[in-house]
Image: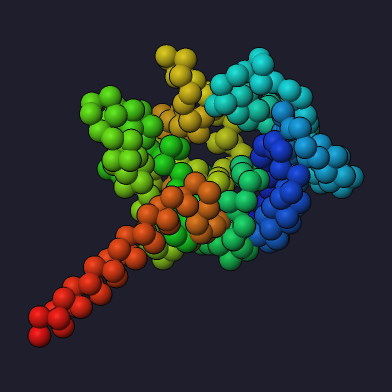
């Protein structure tokens, strides 16, 4: 059974790097979205910032509901980005396991703090607790196209690593633009917010809500067996799936619209529309000319 949000203690976790210009607003929006929870706490892991992120985190930590840890500069030790991110994510898992402050947490929310949760609302969050599906973890959707294809695994929709697919297509004669369209952009579909939840093997989309008992069953790995960069969410979620956990994208859990990850799709769509309109006008003009 799933505990009601109104009687649940929620821990929000995330990573921070060079986000001085947006982290306070992100936290405000996410806090407002989870206002129905019995209690909300934060734990943020910072690394490698060279702007004013750390002073802002120190300011936020005056509130006893907000904690953070800085790992300092770890880029030299972990030069590959996904490996570095995995180490940071495992740090908040360690904190949840060992810190008695979090012993009574019921749900852990993993949130990106880079602007992708700008449209998150109380209504969209509450919708996750009004579902018949007995989810162990659920993930956000976007009001435009679903963007997070690298973290996505679904037998029909996105069964493999989109960037491995991209590189395969290029190595077998495809142009970069065609490979990008086939491997990544074609999978960025629009999911209406009134559709039923989509069960997946992995997803993220900027926000994931986990039962605390579930999130502690796995760990993040950012490199594959070839020591190549690999989406850390995929390794984490496939391990959960092997343990029988049920993971869903929740169409009503809207956290943003277009964003920096999907902006190319938006641009392509606009160009196609303009081109189609131009062709239509040109065709109409030719028809009138013939008459």
Percent position of residue 58, x then y: 86, 40
In this rendering, is residue 201 above or below 265?
above
Q: At 58% from the left edge and 42% from the top edge, which residue is drawn?
A: 211
Seen from this angle, which residue lies furthest bottom?
Answer: 291
Q: At 16% from the left edge and 76% from the top edge, which residue is drawn?
A: 286
Is 259 on the left-hand or right-hand side of 251? right
Q: At 57% from the left edge and 26% from the top edge, which residue is drawn?
A: 81
Q: At 53% from the left edge and 49% from the top edge, which residue is drawn?
A: 260
Q: How is the image coloured?
A: rainbow
- Give 214 or 1, whichever is nearer the viewer: 214
Q: How many marks?
A: 0
Q: Is residue 25 visible?
A: yes
Seen from this angle, which residue lies furthest right?
Answer: 62
Seen from this angle, which residue lies furthest front?
Answer: 289
Quadrant of residue 190 within the rendered picture:
bottom left
Seen from this angle, which residue lies furthest left?
Answer: 291
Percent position of residue 1, x then y: 52, 49
Quadrant of residue 64 within the rendered picture:
top right
Q: Is residue 129 visible?
A: no
In this rendering, is residue 133 above or below 156?
below
Quadrant where the C terminus sits is: bottom left
Percent position of residue 213, x then y: 59, 36
Percent position of residue 267, x then y: 42, 56
């Amino acid at each position: 059974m799933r505990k009601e949000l109104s009687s649940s203690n929620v821990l929000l976790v995330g990573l921070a790097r060079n986000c001085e210009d947006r982290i306070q607003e992100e936290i405000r929006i996410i806090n407002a979205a989870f206002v129905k929870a019995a209690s909300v706490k934060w734990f943020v892991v910072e690394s490698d910032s060279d702007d004013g992120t750390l002073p802002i985190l120190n300011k936020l930590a005056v509130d006893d509901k907000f904690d953070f840890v800085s790992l300092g500069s770890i880029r030299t030790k972990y030069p590959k980005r996904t490996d570095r991110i995995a180490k940071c994510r495992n740090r908040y898992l360690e904190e949840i396991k060992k810190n008695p402050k979090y012993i009574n947490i019921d749900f852990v929310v993993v949130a990106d703090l880079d602007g992708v949760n700008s449209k998150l609302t109380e209504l969209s969050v509450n919708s996750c607790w009004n579902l018949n599906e007995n989810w162990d973890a659920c993930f956000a959707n976007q009001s435009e196209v679903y963007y997070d294809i690298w973290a996505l695994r679904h037998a029909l929709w996105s069964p493999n690593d989109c960037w491995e697919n991209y590189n395969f297509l290029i190595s077998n004669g495809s142009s970069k633009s065609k490979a990008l369209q086939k491997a990544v952009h074609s999978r960025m579909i629009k999911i209406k917010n009134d559709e039923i939840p989509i069960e997946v093997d992995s997803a993220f989309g900027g926000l994931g809500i986990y039962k605390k008992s579930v999130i502690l069953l796995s760990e993040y790995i950012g490199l594959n067996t070839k020591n190549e960069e690999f989406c850390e969410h995929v390794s984490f979620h496939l391990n959960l799936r092997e343990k029988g956990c049920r993971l869903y994208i929740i169409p009503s859990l809207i956290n943003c619209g277009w964003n920096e990850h999907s902006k190319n799709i938006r641009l392509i769509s606009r160009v196609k529309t303009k081109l189609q309109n131009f062709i239509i006008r040109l065709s109409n003009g030719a028809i009138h000319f013939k008459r």
